[in-house]
Structures are given as C-alpha cells and as structure tokens.
C-alpha cells in the first residue's frame, strides 16, 4: 500500500508539473498549494473508506476513531469544499481562464492517479495474485512486444507510436498469454498469494491464511477434441484461476497498450518527450505506469463482475459494529428466515 501511494504521489507530481510548465502558471496565487491540498483531500476520502471497510473491528475499539469513521464522508466533503472556496477566492482578473484550465487539469489528474491507485489497493485485498499477475502481464507484454518488434517488426501499428509494429503487437500477445498461464500456476500453489488479505484484530496484523477457494484448487479438465490430436492428452490438471489468467493477459496485451498510446498522444499534444526524467533512459514514473492504471481498473471490474461473491467475514465485521439491540434484531430476522426455509427446526415452546 505504501509503494502504491508513493507511485501515485510521484505520478501526480509529474502530471501537475507539466501543467505548470505548459500553461506558465507558476505565478497563480495559491494554486500549487491547492493542487496538493486536493490530493490530500481525495486520499483522505479513499483511504478512510478502506479503513472503514477492512478495519471495522479495530476502529470499534478506539473511541477517537469512531467519530472520524462515522462522519468520514461529511468530513471529506467539508475538506473538499474548503479547497473549492479557496479556489474561488483566489480567482484574479485577467487569469480566470488559465485558473480554470488548471482547476480542470488538477481534477483530471486526480481521476487518473488517485482513483486508479485506490482500485489497485482494492485488488490487493482480494489476494496478492490479483496484484502480481496483472502487473507482471503488462511488464511481460511491454518487453516481448519490443523484442518481437525489434527482430521481426515491419508493419507500423499506430502513428502515435511509430516504433510500434503489428509483429511486435501480435508476438507480445501470445507471449503474455503463455507467461500469465505459467506464472499463475506457480502463484496459485501458495496461500500467501491467493488468500484475501484480512486484518486480525487479536494479533493486530494482516493475515493471509485461509482455505483456498475453488479458484485455487487443482481440477481436471477435458481437452477439446481438436487439441487432443495435437497434444495427445485427453485431460489436463490445472487451477481454475489459470483460465481467468487468459482474460487478464488478453486485456494486458490487446487493450493495455492503448494506455501507452494515450500517454504518447498526451506527450505529443504538449510537445514533450517524457513526463519527467526520474529514471535515466526511461523518463518519469508515469512513463512506466501509463498502462498499469488502465489494467488496475479492468482487474477491479473483472473481480466484482465475475469473481467476488458475498464475503461472510466482512459481513460479520459489519454486524459486530451494530448496537446490541440491532444485532438481536438481525439475529431474529435471520433465524425466522432459516426456519421458513427448513434449514433450522422451530424451537419448541413448553
């Protein structure tokens, strides 16, 4: 989480600095301070949501935190509203248009960096495998597409990136799919990578111990008849997650590069070579993570759409926060429901 936060702040800094340089806005009153203030407000909101969601039992034991969590969204809104009012008060004659340019620039940058990094953290809590496989797939595609393009590239792919070729694009796709399939196989064998990250209030630490879900339990699959003649196998043992790795690898290699194309178009629009010079020979941090943010959004949407089901552990934590009379009401309602479905026997009255 600290690594994600550090990368987010650096990417935000690089994009905001481009805005200052392009629009010559260094002399605008308060604006540099307001840009970082808005970053602080948005991070406070998202990290507060994470704390309320995953650290509910810990917060319940701390009275000073209960107030912050209970009124978290109101406090977040009040903080943002303060920044909004400060922006309006900072408006000066002859600079109105420039100031609104930079206001919009700041908010789009927040949308790109902070929102996406929050989704990365949400993916982390689902299990390290949902973090490592997508990130590694993007890196693998970047490297293999370059290698195939260098040795076999002949046909230009897109004008935004003249060095990109169809040969590299296609070679990167197949290489990434194979890599994701193999890498998933090794990660799926270890609880540390597949178990959702949960906070244990008794030991006061994160734990990654669980009974692996069906996604990470070896199963036997029938090989399609067409492939049986080629491979000579009728069945194959694999983890169900490896099937999902195809979707992740496909997105990383077919759609993920468009994040890089978008960044290339952005840099060409403002006539700059790189976002920054943080990494010698590579440019800025944003130059290396332009595809990762798009990938993080896809993984989050994929998990919520096709993977995640009701989480009893999280639901129990939320129930424990309720007042005793509320917990009793939930218990009676649940008991009545289970009796109606025939799962529980009605209690005898004597």
Image: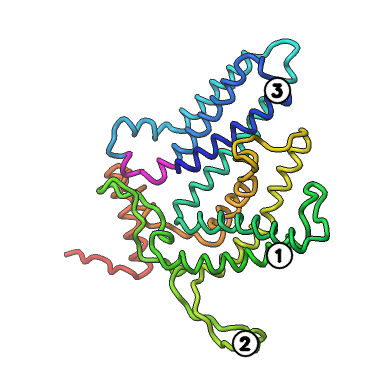
Find numbered disc 2 in the image and state the secondary structure of the residue it sits on.
helix
Farthest residue, direction left: 350
According to the picture, the residue beneath numbered tag 3 turns out to be 100
On the rendered image, what quadrant is the N terminus found in?
Answer: top left
Residue that appears at 56% across and 38% down? 114
Residue density around tag 3, few if under 14, some if 14–19, many if 20 or more, within 10 Å? some
> Which is the main secondary structure of the residues drawn in magenta?
helix
* Image spot of residue 244 (x, y percent): 56, 66
Q: Is residue 53 magenta?
A: yes
First along the sequence among labels 3 and 1: 3
Residue that appears at 59% across and 58% down? 137
The span picked out in magenta is: 50-59
The image quadrant of residue 100 is: top right
Residue that appears at 62% across and 87% down? 228
* Image spot of residue 279 (x, y percent): 60, 40
According to the picture, the residue beneath numbered tag 1 turns out to be 171
């Amino acid at each position: 989480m600290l690594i994600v936060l550090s990368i987010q702040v650096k990417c935000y800094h690089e994009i905001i600095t481009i805005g200052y340089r392009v629009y010559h806005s260094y002399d605008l009153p308060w604006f540099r301070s307001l840009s970082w203030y808005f970053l602080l407000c948005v991070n406070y909101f998202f990290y507060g949501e994470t704390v309320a969601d995953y650290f509910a039992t810990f917060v319940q034991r701390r009275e000073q935190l209960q107030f912050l969590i209970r009124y978290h969204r109101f406090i977040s809104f009040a903080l943002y509203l303060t920044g909004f009012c400060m922006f309006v008060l900072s408006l000066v004659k002859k600079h109105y248009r420039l100031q609104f340019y930079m206001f919009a620039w700041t908010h789009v940058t927040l949308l790109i960096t902070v929102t996406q990094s929050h989704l990365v953290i949400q993916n982390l809590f689902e299990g390290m495998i949902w973090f490592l496989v997508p990130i590694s797939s993007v890196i693998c595609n970047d490297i293999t597409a370059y290698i195939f393009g260098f040795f076999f590239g002949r046909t230009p792919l897109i004008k935004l990136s003249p060095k990109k070729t169809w040969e590299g694009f296609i070679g990167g796709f197949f290489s990434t799919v194979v890599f994701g399939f193999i890498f998933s196989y090794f990660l799926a064998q270890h609880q540390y990578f597949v178990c959702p990250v949960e906070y244990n209030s008794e030991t006061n630490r994160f734990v990654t111990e669980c009974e692996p879900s069906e996604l990470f339990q070896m199963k036997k699959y029938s090989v399609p008849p067409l492939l049986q003649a080629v491979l000579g196998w009728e069945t194959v043992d694999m983890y169900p997650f490896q099937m999902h790795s195809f979707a992740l690898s496909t997105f990383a290699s077919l759609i993920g590069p468009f994040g890089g194309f978008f960044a290339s178009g952005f840099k060409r629009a403002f006539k700059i070579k790189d976002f920054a010079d943080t990494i010698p020979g590579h440019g800025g941090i944003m130059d290396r993570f332009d595809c990762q943010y798009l990938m993080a959004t896809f993984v989050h949407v994929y998990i919520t759409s096709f993977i995640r089901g009701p989480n009893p552990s999280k639901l129990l934590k939320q129930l424990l926060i309720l007042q005793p009379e509320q917990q009793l009401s939930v218990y009676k309602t649940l008991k009545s429901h289970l009796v109606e479905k025939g799962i529980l026997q009605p209690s005898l009255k004597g």
